[in-house]
Image: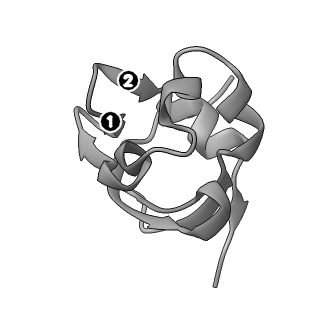
């Protein structure tokens, strides 16, 4: 069973990395590169839209109604210091 935690901030890093802060105070790093070949995220690849990531409704969203599940972001990210 996974714990549903909201994303409270996101920073876009080079090579499709996202630096995330969750509501529990954890800072985590998520690699979006493997998703860039899949729909709907393929629309963000090699586009300035990727850098327009922001937090809405507890997860990361992009223009064009693109988002990613917060559970995925938490469970598949790595804890940073």
Q: Which residue is mark 1?
A: 62
Residue 13, image x, y percentages: 53, 69
Report how far apart the C-alphas of labels 1 and 2 lie in the structure: 5 Å
Q: Residue at x 59, y 64 (%)?
A: 28
Disc 1 on helix, strand or loop? Answer: strand
Q: Residue at x 69, y 40 (%)?
A: 75
Q: Cβ–Cβ below 8 Å for labels 1 and 2? A: yes
Residue 64, image x, y percentages: 28, 22
Callout 2 crowding tier (Cα within 10 Å): few <14, some 14–19, many ≥20: some
Tell whether 40 sits left or right of 7: right
The single residue placed furthest to the top in the displayed view is: 39
Q: Quadrant of residue 24?
A: bottom left
Tell whether 27 sits left or right of 53: right
Residue 6 got which mark? none
The foreground one among 75 and 47 is 47
Q: Which residue is mark 2?
A: 66
The single residue placed furthest to the left in the displayed view is: 56
Q: Residue at x 58, y 41 (%)?
A: 73
The foreground one among 14 and 72 is 14
Residue 45, image x, y percentages: 57, 39
Q: Residue at x 72, y 26 (%)?
A: 37
The single residue placed furthest to the bottom in the displayed view is: 81
Callout 1 crowding tier (Cα within 10 Å): few <14, some 14–19, many ≥20: some
Tell whether 46 sits left or right of 36: left
Disc 2 on helix, strand or loop? Answer: strand
The foreground one among 11 and 20 is 11
Tell whether 43 sits left or right of 39: left
């Amino acid at each position: 069973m996974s714990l549903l935690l909201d994303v409270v901030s996101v920073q876009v890093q080079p090579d499709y990395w996202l630096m995330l802060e969750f509501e529990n105070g954890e800072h985590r790093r998520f690699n979006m590169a493997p998703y860039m070949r899949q729909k709907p995220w393929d629309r963000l690849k090699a586009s300035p839209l990727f850098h327009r990531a922001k937090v809405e409704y507890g997860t990361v969203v992009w223009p064009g109604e693109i988002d990613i599940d917060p559970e995925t972001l938490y469970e598949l990210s790595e804890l940073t210091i």
